[in-house]
Image (spheres, rainbow, N blue to C red):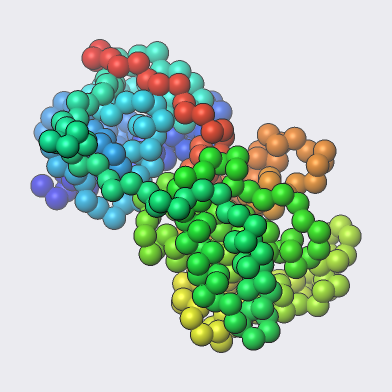
Amino acid sequence: MAEALDEAVALLAQLARAATTRALYPADHPQSRTASAELVSALERCLRRRGEDEITFLTVDQDVILDERPLRTKSMYLRPFAKLMGRLGVQRVTLARGLSASEAEVLASAFAGIASFDGIAHVAVGRVAVALGDDGAESGSGSGGSARGGRLDDGDYDSGKGAFAGLAGSGAGIAQLDQLVWRVVEAVASTSRSMLLLAPVRDFDEELFQHSLNTAMIAVALARALGIDGDPLHAIGFGALLHDVGKLALPRQIWSQEGALDGGSWEVARLHPELGAALLAGVDGVPPLAVLVAYEHHLRWDRQPSYPATSRQPGLASQITAVADSWDVMVEQASPGSTTRAAAIAAWSTRAGTYLDPFLVGQLVTWMRDDEPAAPLAPSSAR
């Protein structure tokens, strides 16, 4: 039955992709139509493989359950599906044979949080009764978050800033930066999106550190949404925090120019991924993933020419960092009054499918849209 399980996971992946695609494009856009059609096809393949007319997924905490068993796979789409279910206030979704493309579009729009769910003939949703243990706690629930939690404080910021600046010299301060990343992980787990990102700063060194810290917080939030936790989550945050450290090795006048860099300055600026990777490779205590992220964070998802000059596709940690990095530059750090936030997001979203992984872009748009949960789906038994 391994093939049937694979098809079920593929169906969840396509539902998550359809939702993130719908978050980026209007319903009549070719990308949205294609995603809806592929969702219908994925459902038909899954049901055919299972020999059934419908399939039901349950979510309890962060687990996705099929046939009374949690799905234990490495798919990065499981956690996004569970989170979408949570935003919509339901724990059960049943998809039945006969789902049409138009119904799939309505479902994707509801999961994207941009349309209400008015009932779909071949989809049923509802809640799950969770049994309580003797102590009154939900069975199967997680152990909870860190006791520290909360927003980063001034001490975290100041110590991290000094350690970051020191990387270009002695390379000291890695232990401080390591602790800062753990604080980022805690803060992201317990703080709303609107409280995460930092205010504007005064000079280049501080601006670079602020951008790096913002990028780390966004990257950690995005990685958490994909189900990454613990040490791997910390490693991604560490790589994101240090992704631009190569800029410290470049002449200061490169970054003090007004407006776009000229040809010669731009060619020098494009060296910062290689310089950053070389710098980090020579510092004791820097994890190899951070070196890789520094080198790869400007490589394109579609493998077209970029910098450094290689055609390979960047790894997942580098792709997450690239999405977070470009969001902070193009959306969060846009000059006041230069454009509306909606226009900035639209401009950034055009990088999906070329420079950036479109699924990760859709995930971030969905998470960043607002701090309010989506309108809940009305429980239904109709088919």
**Location of residue 50 in the rendering, given as x and y in whole percent from the top left corner:** 13, 37
Number of residue marks: 0
Q: Is residue 149 visible?
A: yes
In this view of the protein, which residue sits in the foreground, 290 or 15? 290
**Location of residue 323 in the rendering, given as x and y in whole percent from the top left corner:** 57, 53
Point out the residue furthest to the right here: 258
Q: Is residue 356 visible?
A: no
Residue at 29 percent of width and 39 percent of height? 61
Residue at 56 percent of width and 49 percent of height? 151
**Location of residue 178 in the rendering, given as x and y in whole percent from the top left corner:** 50, 70
Residue at 63 percent of width and 73 percent of height? 163
Residue at 32 percent of width and 26 percent of height? 90
Asked if residue 170 lies left or right of residue 61, the reply is right
In this view of the protein, which residue sits in the foreground, 252 or 147? 147
Is the residue 18 above or below the residue 244 in the image?
A: above
Q: To which quarter of the image does residue 111 belong? A: top left
Is the residue 114 above or below the residue 269 in the image?
A: above
Q: To which quarter of the image does residue 39 belong? A: top left
Asked if residue 338 lies left or right of residue 86, the reply is right
Asked if residue 149 lies left or right of residue 48, the reply is right
**Location of residue 224 in the rendering, given as x and y in whole percent from the top left corner:** 42, 50
Asked if residue 125 lies left or right of residue 186, the reply is left
In this view of the protein, which residue sits in the foreground, 348 or 154? 154
Q: Quadrant of the C terminus?
A: top left
Is the residue 296 above or below the residue 350 in the image?
A: below
